[in-house]
């Protein structure tokens, strides 16, 4: 008897996203800056240290027929993108401070990250819908439902990391689970020198 096609592991979609990895010293700065807020918002779901990253493109459900195509597209998209320096500075929340569903760390210079994300977005439009919302480079630190009403002091949180060189992007697979997902790097794509 033939196996049901849907039951085969290779027939199931993967949850994929493209991101920038964050080095340990930057994670240290994020943890130190947000430490007081962990106590203030105990019901928020805090992103584990190992999951901290900067999403450039969330692909979501990706069918097996695209598992070779996606890496080819991402590799081609970043071939001519130069390495650049990044530094976290400041904090914020989506959609607003009155309804904080996502707490994040921002960047002092967003243009190189936005340009990189635009290249990746453009390379994948044949198979993935274009994001309608404007791209806002950030590193998500916590999520909350119901949303948090953030005090004015939150916006003044002192966060400034050391700069690091963004030399590559990573294609990650997300394995959903509780209490948090696990992110598996599938491939790294170097930026040009």
Image (tube, rainbow, N blue to C red):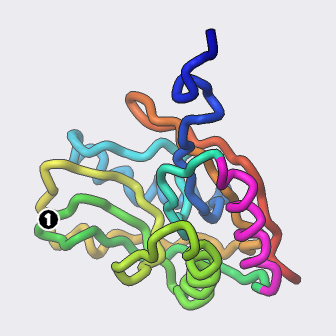
Q: Residue at x 78, y 76 (%)?
A: 76
Report which residue position mark 1 lands on: 99
Q: Which secondary structure class fits the magenta region best?
A: helix
Q: Residue 184 location, x and y as percent? A: 64, 42
113 falls in the magenta region: no
Left or right of 161? Residue 189 is right
The quadrant in which residue 87 appears is bottom right
75 falls in the magenta region: yes
Above or below for 21 versus 9: below
Question: Of all residues shown, which one is farthest toward the right?
Answer: 193
Question: Of all residues shown, which one is farthest toward the front?
Answer: 1
Q: Residue at x 80, y 76 (%)?
A: 191
| Quadrant where the image shows the N terminus | top right
Left or right of 50? Residue 134 is left
The local secondary structure at tag 1 comes to: loop
Residue interval drawn in magenta: 65-80
Q: Residue at x 14, y 65 (%)?
A: 99
Left or right of 120? Residue 151 is left
Above or below for 30 versus 79: above
| Quadrant where the image shows the C terminus | bottom right
Q: Residue 162 location, x and y as percent? A: 63, 72
Foreground pick, 141 / 116: 116
Question: Of all residues shown, which one is farthest toward the bottom?
Answer: 111
The quadrant in which residue 93 appears is bottom left
Q: Is residue 127 visible?
A: yes
Q: Residue 122 location, x and y as percent? A: 59, 82
Classed neighbour count for the residue bearing mark 1: other residues with Cα under 10 Å, few (<14), some (14–19), many (≥20): some
The quadrant in which residue 53 appears is bottom right
Left or right of 23? Residue 51 is left
Q: Residue 105 location, x and y as percent? A: 43, 68
- Counting labels gives 1
Above or below for 8 versus 13: above
């Amino acid at each position: 008897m033939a196996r049901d096609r849907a039951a085969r592991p290779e027939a199931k979609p993967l949850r994929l996203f493209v991101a920038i990895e964050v080095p340990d010293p930057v994670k240290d700065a994020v943890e130190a800056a947000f430490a007081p807020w962990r106590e203030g918002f105990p019901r928020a779901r805090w992103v584990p240290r190992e999951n901290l990253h900067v999403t450039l493109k969330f692909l979501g459900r990706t069918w097996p027929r695209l598992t070779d195509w996606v890496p080819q597209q991402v590799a081609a998209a970043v071939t001519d993108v130069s390495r650049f320096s990044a530094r976290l500075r400041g904090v914020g929340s989506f959609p607003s401070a009155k309804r904080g569903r996502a707490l994040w760390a921002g960047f002092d210079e967003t243009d190189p990250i936005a340009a990189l994300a635009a290249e990746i977005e453009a390379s994948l439009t044949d198979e993935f819908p274009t994001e309608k919302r404007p791209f806002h480079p950030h590193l998500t630190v916590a999520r909350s439902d119901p949303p948090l009403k953030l005090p004015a002091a939150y916006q003044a949180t002192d966060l400034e990391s050391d700069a690091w060189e963004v030399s590559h992007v990573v294609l990650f697979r997300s394995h959903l689970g509780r209490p948090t997902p696990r992110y598996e790097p599938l491939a790294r794509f170097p930026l040009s020198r």
